[in-house]
Amino acid sequence: MENPFKFGSVVSGEDFADRRRELAELSRELAGGQHIFLLSPRRYGKTSLILTLLDRLRSRGRLVAYVDAFRTTTSAQLLEVIAQTVLRAAESRPERLLRLAGDLLGRLRPHVGTDSAGKPTLSLDLGASPRSSLALQEEVLALPERLAQKRKRRLVLAFDEFQEMKRFPGASLEKAMRSHFQHHRHVSYLFAGSRQSVLQDMATRERSPFYKFGRVMSLGPIPQEEFAPFLEARFKRGRLGVSAHVLAAILSAADDVPYNVQRLCHQLWDMLAGKTDRITEKDIGRAIAIIVVQDAPYFSTAWDRLSLHQRQVLQAIARAGGRNVFASDFLTAHRLGSHSSVQTSLRQLLKEQIVLKVNGEYRIADSFFREWIGTRSA
């Protein structure tokens, strides 16, 4: 039987572990016209959540569009993706898409084709002059509101990894977006990102163009009372029994991080399905050991990029936890040097999301990486 635990890719339908509270809250806010900044650590299932959310809103009569800013490298490319996804929210047939594009973006001489999957694609005649670039920006950023008004339906436009646009030269696009979007009355915007500090700055720093443009929400772990029944039901497909105590141990071993939980359960299934009828706590340790060996090449690459002091800090957190990292006895016991040097290393580790700060405690973001570090410092 196919392994029911999925990791490393976007999931939907029955493979999506229901985030009932988040889905209900986001649906209500966006349907009501609120703009949202969604902050999420890596491996928390942000993209799967967004796409499930958009499917739900579509089924309720909203127009929905999804833009992955991570896949774009220039302002012009991002604008073209926005135009394509917004228009495809309303039309799926190439001839109708071309007609709609002509109505709403006629100045940009749109061209419609199809990709290898038969889906319609849109390209715009960008030109090379500064004037044509400005025309592209003005036309595309006005498009979401124009489309929503034309179809007399609210449009929900979601930007995934929105903070990536900060890498583009200059700040003109960010300012232009705010200038246009603040006047849109029939469009709700969702700005999501896994570089949490950057996206939070975009939403809350006074000098940022998007300062106070929308509500800030943080995506946390899936509550255990939701996740545990989801996992138990999937183990039962392989006639694998699992107690509440062992389920709690699985979630704890993976720090409740959705990706890591699914990865660990995937390995337990591979190890045990068809060979036993019960999962034990010892099996969890065996599965983690296999994962650590499998991922050792990735961990070694990440380790090589770190400074010697950053490695020392990680080893100390792996051994003793990260609640009192600035206490003098912690610094002395792990030979970490001064308070300021630890602060500098942690600042960089947080920026790279190798370490997270949760309820005042510094935690290695990947529980399997933490185990790998533990084997090196034993």
Image (cartoon, rainbow, N blue to C red):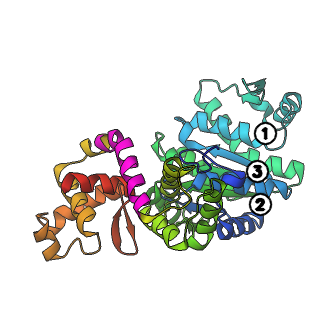
User: Comparing marks 3 and 2, which lies closer to the viewer?
Assistant: 3
* Type of amino acid under label 1: Arg
> In the depicted view, which residue is nearer to us: 284 or 169?
284
Disc ID at residue 64:
3
Residue that mark 2 sits on: 185
Disc ID at residue 88:
1
Alpha carbons under labels 3 and 1: distance apart? 9 Å
> In the depicted view, which residue is nearer to us: 355 or 100?
355
Q: Position of residue 151 (x, y in %)?
A: 88, 49
Task: Indicate the secondary structure of the residue bearing disc 3.
Answer: strand
Q: Is residue 133 above or below residue 60?
A: above
Q: Position of residue 220 (x, y in %)?
A: 53, 67
Identify which residue is drawn at 22% across, 54% down: 310
- The verdict on residue 10 being magenta is no
Identify which residue is drawn at 48% across, 47% down: 166
Q: Quadrant of residue 296?
A: top left
> In the depicted view, which residue is nearer to us: 161 or 318?
318
Magenta-colored span: 282-300
Identify which residue is drawn at 29% across, 42% down: 300
Q: Earlier in the sequence, mark 3 or mark 2?
A: 3
User: Comparing marks 2 and 1, which lies closer to the viewer?
Assistant: 1
* Type of amino acid under label 3: Val
Q: Quadrant of residue 141?
A: top right
